[in-house]
Image (spheres, rainbow, N blue to C red):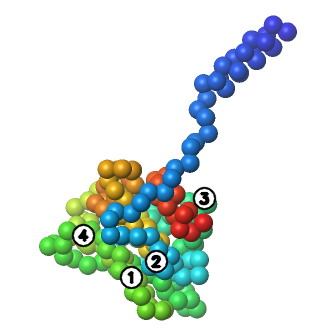
Amino acid sequence: MNRFFVALSAAASLLLLAPGPARAVDPAPCVKGESESKSRSSVDEGEIRYTDSSQYHAEIKHAIAAWQYSGAKIKIVGDTASTVNDLDFQDFNDAKSTAAGIWSYNAEPAWTDYIRFNKAKMSLYSAKKRRSVAAHELGHALGLCHKDFNTTHSLMWPQVQEDYDVPQAVDKANYKKLWG
C-alpha cells in the first residue's frame, strides 16, 4: 500500500510539472498597404491545381507538404488534363533582381498564376532557405500577406529568412482566419 502512495505521489508531481495546454495564437495584421484575401489568391473551389516547370522540385514538394498540415482546408494537388491549372512554378534568372521568388496573380478567370524562382538568388541559398522561399511564395498563393518582422515570428516576413521553412503558429492562425 505504501508503494501505491509513493507511485501516486510521483505521478501527481509529474502532472504539476507538465506544461499546460498550448495557448492559441492570434492572427497577425498585414504590413501596411497589404491585405489578405480569398479573392486575391490562387485558390479555386477549395484547391490549388499546379504544374511544376521549375528546377526546384524538392523545394516545391516541401512547400506543399508544409501548407498541407493537419487542419489545413485548401488542397494543393497536381494539375491533370481534366482540371484547370491554377498555379505554375517556373524559374527565371536575373542577377539584378533582389527577389528570390515572386508570386504573380492573374485576375482573369481561368488564367494561371505563377510562382517564379530567381535562379541567380536561389543558387546562393542553403537548401533550408530555398525551402523557405518556396513555402513563403506558396503562402502568398494561399492569399496570405507579409507580416511585420518586429512583432511576430512568421514564414511570411517580407524578407525570407532561413529561420523558418514551414508556417509558424501565426501563419496558421492567419490561414485559419482566411480559410476556416
Q: Amino acid at mark 2?
A: Ser
* Contact between labelled residues 3 and 2, with CB atoms less than 8 Å apart: no
**How far apart are the alpha carbons under marks 4 and 1?**
16 Å
Of badges 4 and 1, nearer the viewer stands 1
Residue at 49%, 80% (x, y): give it: 39
Q: Of label 4 and label 3, which has the lower sequence position?
A: 3
- Of the image marks 2 and 4, the number of the one nearer the N terminus: 2
**Which residue is denoted by mark 2 in the rendering?**
41
Q: Residues within 10 Å of mark 2 (few under 14, many from 20)?
A: many
Disc 4 packing (10 Å; few <14; some 14–19; many ≥20): some
Q: Is residue 105 above or below residue 119?
A: below
User: Which label lies toward us, 2 or 3?
Assistant: 2
Q: Give the Cα separation between the discs numbered 2 and 4.
A: 20 Å
Mark 1 or mark 2: name the one nearer the start of the chain: 2
Q: Earlier in the sequence, mark 4 or mark 1?
A: 4
Q: Dots 1 and 2: beta carbons under 8 Å? A: yes
Q: CA distance from mark 1 to mark 3?
A: 27 Å
How far apart marks 1 and 2 lie (CA) works out to 7 Å
**Mark 4 touches mark 1? (CB < 8 Å):** no
126 or 20: nearer the eye?
A: 20
- Which circle, 2 or 4, is nearer the viewer? 2
User: Which residue is disc 4 drawn over?
Assistant: 99
Q: Which residue is mark 3?
A: 70
Helix, strand or loop under label 4: loop
Under tag 2, what secondary structure?
loop
Name the image quarter holding residue 117. Answer: bottom left
Label whose residue precedes the other's in the sequence (1 or 3): 3
Going from the N terminus, do you reach mark 2 or mark 3 first? 2
* Quadrant of the image occupied by residue 118: bottom left
- Residue 19, how many percent across, how many down? 59, 32
